[in-house]
Image (spheres, rainbow, N blue to C red):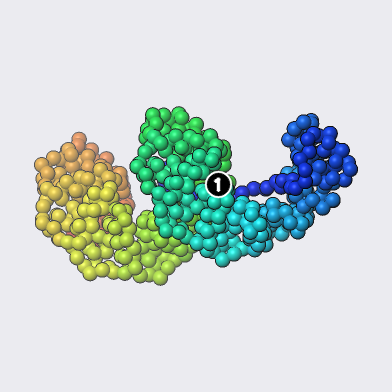
């Protein structure tokens, strides 16, 4: 299955900034010199005095801070027709400041403010319609309200309307219109508009790509104190886009962004510390920054932390802690966290082993766009691990993984097409999938494609092409590829006949766990073909073949024990090995057991003759002609 994912990807420009609730300001009227004068004016029915006095109570200027009194004064002014006070009172209800929190009441007050001409009320009403807080969620209505606010001079409305056009929410998607609105907002003093406009110029989205212009806009935002601008400017400097590449300057800017509350700044600064680029290499500092980013809600940083704890990279290995970080990331919607948590549950590392939970997490990862999750879920369905076995579902998931760039998925889908498991049998499609995987560097794909060329299944038979593919597979660590290539060198098919090369390849295959390679190599040492003759070495290698359940290896080792060739002579051990060989399907093993019964070597008893005859019969039926004469 695919292994743990999640070295954190460095975040790039384009953070989404939605402007929040806006307060209104008292307008018109004469300046009032003191709180006492304002109180007198408010008591005398001067609504603007009430608004000013409410602001004093909210901020604690010249009076004791009292949010309840402030809310009461806003209520009084709103009742007297001051639209800005209705907006400010709406904010109090939205936040539960001085009054009980009440989203419905807040919405009604924003509506009243907007209708009364306070464009901040239109903006705030747009926000709650976009979020569906106290009113039905309605992106179309939100867009109309942001348009009203923007037209009325509230540039924050231009920012949020631009975001809706960028996403196509409530309005047709239109990147040009979005960019124009961000330009309007930025020119009007809304720094968030400058950040978004910079991101558009950086990517060439709705405007011609212009990295220098993007840099200038991010610089403007950063200088104005907007941490997101510093973050994006840091990325520009790190990548050298429109400015000279400068990791040191990037680190300074990421630090500013991180301090300003942009979790991505903490993450990217951590990556610089991990790599020692622009700052001293410091894994402890990197971990602290990842932790800060994760705690601030950046799921990607949680995944990165989890991977480091799982691998013990820069910290002592702690799979339980890794699982906790993956869980946090997964819960926050980061599919890579779900995938890695699934791996831990599959193996029972740091969490209880639970194949059902693992498969559910792989499902979540797959749905979230992690192709490795689709592949691992396909394996679960193929083998019935944690889910009912379902070859059709497995094949569909392998298809999804293959399309998503997981070449191992192409190999498994090819195997399903080759055998007609869950999909129509199609050897041509199988060969094409193996070729795709091989091209992507998956050695198993090269090996399987080599087999197809060797047999002419789904492709023209071509021993030379098969040999080249086996060589790729062998080099990529597929021991079966070394074995198959060794056989071709032994026979001179598609490659020059070369017993020395064949022996070296079988040695490689045997070391890689291919028991048939051990058998072939053992025969070579026994006969001195491509290697010096060496009965001791042959016996050791036949032992490996036998342990790997190659019946002919057990028989060959039995012959050595029977004759004392390379090992001490031991008739009982020989008989046991012949028995194992016979049980494993080696006709020569059955014949040799029969001989031992007939001759009383290592086997004996009153039924020896009939037992010998039954073993000869087995060998004869298996096609060993000399056994037929012994029955």
Q: Residue at x 37, y 47 (%)?
A: 242
Q: Residue at x 18, y 42 (%)?
A: 538
Q: Residue furthest right?
A: 44
Residue 20, position as x, y percentages in the image: 64, 48
Toward the viewer: 20 or 26? 26
Check the image and report above or below for 441 versus 30.
below
Q: Residue at x 55, y 37 (%)?
A: 260
Q: Residue at x 18, y 63 (%)?
A: 463
- Mark 1 is surrounded, within 10 Å at the Cα level, by few (under 14), some (14 to 19) or many (20 or more) other residues, namely many
Toward the viewer: 120 or 265? 120
Relative horizontal placement of residue 232, taking residue 516 as reference (left or right): right
The mark tally for this picture is 1
Query: What quarter of the picture does the C terminus occupy?
Result: bottom left
Check the image and report above or below for 388 versus 426.
above
Q: Which residue is identified by label 1?
A: 191
Toward the viewer: 218 or 491? 218
Residue 445, position as x, y percentages in the image: 31, 57
């Amino acid at each position: 299955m695919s292994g743990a994912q999640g070295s954190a990807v460095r975040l790039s420009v384009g953070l989404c900034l939605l402007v929040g609730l806006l307060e209104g300001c008292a307008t018109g009227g004469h300046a009032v010199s003191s709180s006492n004068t304002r109180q007198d004016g408010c008591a005398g029915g001067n609504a603007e005095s009430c608004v000013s006095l409410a602001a004093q109570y909210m901020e604690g200027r010249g009076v004791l801070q009292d949010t309840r009194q402030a809310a009461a004064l806003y209520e009084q002014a709103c009742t007297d027709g001051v639209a800005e006070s209705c907006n400010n009172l709406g904010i109090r209800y939205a936040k539960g400041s001085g009054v009980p929190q009440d989203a419905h009441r807040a919405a009604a007050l924003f509506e009243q403010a907007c209708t009364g001409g306070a464009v901040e009320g239109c903006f705030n009403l747009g926000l709650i319609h976009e979020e569906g807080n106290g009113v039905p969620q309605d992106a179309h209505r939100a867009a109309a309200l942001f348009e009203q606010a923007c037209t009325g001079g509230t540039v924050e409305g231009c920012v949020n309307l631009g975001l809706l056009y960028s996403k196509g929410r409530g309005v047709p998607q239109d990147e040009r219109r979005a960019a124009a609105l961000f330009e309007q907002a930025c020119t009007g003093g809304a720094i968030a508009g400058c950040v978004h406009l910079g991101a558009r110029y950086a990517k060439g989205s709705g405007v011609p790509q212009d990295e220098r212009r993007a840099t200038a806009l991010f610089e403007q935002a950063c200088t104005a104190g907007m941490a997101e601008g510093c973050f994006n400017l840091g990325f520009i400097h790190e990548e050298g886009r429109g400015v000279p590449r400068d990791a040191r300057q990037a680190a300074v800017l990421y630090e500013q962004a991180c301090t300003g509350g942009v979790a991505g700044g903490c993450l990217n600064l951590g990556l610089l510390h991990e790599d020692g680029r622009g700052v001293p290499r410091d894994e402890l500092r990197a971990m602290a920054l990842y932790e800060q980013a994760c705690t601030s809600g950046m799921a990607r940083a949680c995944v990165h932390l989890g991977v480091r704890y799982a691998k013990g990279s820069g910290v002592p290995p702690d799979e339980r802690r890794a699982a906790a970080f993956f869980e946090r990331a997964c819960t926050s919607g980061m599919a890579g966290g779900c995938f890695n948590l699934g791996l831990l549950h599959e193996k029972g590392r740091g969490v209880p082993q639970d194949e059902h939970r693992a498969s559910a997490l792989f499902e979540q990862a797959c749905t979230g766009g992690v192709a490795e999750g689709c592949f691992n879920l396909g394996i679960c369905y193929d083998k019935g691990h944690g889910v009912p076995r379902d070859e059709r579902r497995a094949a569909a998931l392998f298809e999804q993984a293959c399309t998503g760039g997981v070449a191992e998925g192409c190999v498994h889908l090819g195997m399903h097409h080759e055998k007609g498991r869950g999909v129509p049998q199609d050897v041509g499609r199988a060969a094409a999938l193996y070729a795709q995987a091989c091209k992507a560097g998956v050695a198993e794909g090269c090996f399987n494609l080599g087999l197809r060329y060797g047999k002419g299944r789904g492709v023209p038979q071509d021993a030379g092409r098969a040999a080249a593919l086996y060589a790729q597979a062998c080099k990529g660590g597929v021991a079966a590829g070394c074995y198959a290539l060794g056989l071709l060198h032994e026979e001179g098919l598609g490659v020059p006949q070369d017993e020395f090369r064949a022996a070296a390849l079988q040695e490689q295959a045997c070391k890689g766990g291919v028991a048939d390679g051990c058998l072939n190599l053992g025969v070579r040492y026994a006969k001195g073909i491509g290697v010096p003759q060496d009965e001791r070495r042959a016996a050791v290698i036949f032992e490996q073949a036998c342990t790997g359940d190659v019946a002919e290896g057990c028989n060959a080792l039995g012959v050595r024990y029977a004759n004392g060739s390379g090992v001490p002579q031991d008739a009982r051990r020989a008989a046991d090995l012949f028995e194992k060989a016979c049980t494993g399907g080696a006709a020569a093993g059955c014949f040799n057991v029969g001989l031992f019964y007939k001759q009383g070597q290592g086997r004996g008893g009153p039924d020896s003759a009939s037992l010998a005859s039954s073993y000869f019969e087995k060998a004869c039926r298996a096609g060993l002609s000399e056994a037929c004469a012994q029955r």
